[in-house]
Amino acid sequence: MGNRLEGKTAIVTGGGSIGPGIGNGKAAAALFAREGARVMVVDLNLEAAEETRRLIEGEGGSCFTSRADVSVAADCERIAGECVRELGRIDILHNNVGIEIPGGILEITEDDWDRTLDVNLKSIFLMCRAVVPRMVEQGGGSIVNISSINGIRTLPALSGAYGASKLGMVALTREIAVEFAAKGIRCNAVLPGMMRTPFVEASLTDAWGGDVADMMRQRDAMVPIGRQGESWDTAHAALFLASDDAAYVTGTTLVVDGGLTCGVRTAPQGG
Ligand code: NAP
């Protein structure tokens, strides 16, 4: 337990996990609480959010949950209102929700394209539009958007819609950062690389050939550090950006990928 977020409140969207285990949102919610934040976990799947609440409360932290779809404007407004009512203010907005529907542009349907852009990108606009006025009123806040290295490079499981949405998030992050810098609001993005999370197994197995163990082996082998990252790696980067340690950091992208954007792993050198 630390105190880097002592006295702060945080909304974490997609703070449940799509499957058994700990995804990026769940890890961030738990880590924020360990560092002293009172956390609101928002998720489409209330039971998944409740699991995170039990984890946080089991560790002595403070958490409440709300079911919402962050691609729907009315839900985003309601979330912001609920957070202020329950916790008094919103210091941190952690936009973690994201979906990936694999497929190149000749495979993906128009509906899947629209859904991906709505859930991954429009949701950031909607959540920020609901939360930023409250942050302005209280004199500041920190927004962390979970993008992906897929916004700046392709990966073996092609997904044009996903990549486009994730790069769109980077542009929006910069716009928000500059627009609200003078109001004390910082806005940054984390770009995770290939992380070993329930999201990968649930969304990408077919695109990597259908065998989970083989997919994990292939993904581990590509990364210069020699393995995929963990949800906690994403969460630690988000904690830095959310906290006052990053008081002079805004509009930036923090890549957390074990070196993958520098290049794929080469064979170990002898001698
Ligand atoms: P996750 O386990 O798939 O999702 C967390 C929760 O978000 C799930 O409970 C899910 O509910 C919920 N959710 C989905 N759509 C929603 C919506 N419209 N409104 C509210 N909640 C919604 O994902 P995660 O591990 O926490 O984090 C995923 C984030 O990391 C995404 O933004 C992803 O793009 C990014 N990322 C992941 C990797 C990786 O390798 N894992 C790499 C780069 C970036 P349901 O289960 O009902 O769908």
Image (cartoon, rainbow, N blue to C red):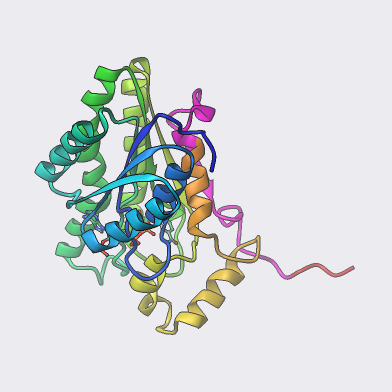
Q: Nearer the viewer, residue 236 or 124?
A: 236
Count of numbered marks? 0
Depth order, front residue of 6/223: 6
Quadrant of the frame with the C terminus: bottom right
61 displayed left or right of 217: left
Instruction: Determine the residue located farthest toward the right in the rendered image.
Output: 271
Above-or-below relation of 39 to 224: above
Please tell me which residue is depicted at 56% across the width and 77% down the height of the picture. Answer: 217
Splitting the image into 4 quarters, where does residue 94 fall? top left
Residue 71 percent location from the top left of the image: 17, 49
Residue at the image position 23 percent from the left and 32 percent from the top: 131
For image coordinates 49% across by 51% down, the residue present is 234
* Residue at (53, 52) in percent of width and height: 233
For the view shown, which residue lies furthest in the left direction? Answer: 74
Q: Is 223 rendered above or below residue 185?
A: below
Identify which residue, 214 or 27, lies in the foreground: 27
Q: How far from the left and from the top, in percent, is residue 179? A: 31, 22
112 inside magenta stretch: no
Q: Is residue 245 magenta?
A: yes
Figure quadrant of residue 12: top left
Residue 99: image location, x then y, percent: 29, 60
* Residue sitting at the far top: 182
Tell me, yes or no, if residue 151 can be seen here.
no
Question: Residue 197: image x %, image y %?
Answer: 44, 65
Q: Magenta residues, as a range?
A: 241-267
Quarter for ligand 1?
bottom left
Principal secondary structure, stretch drawn in magenta: loop
Kindly tell me whether residue 44 is visible in this rendering. Answer: yes
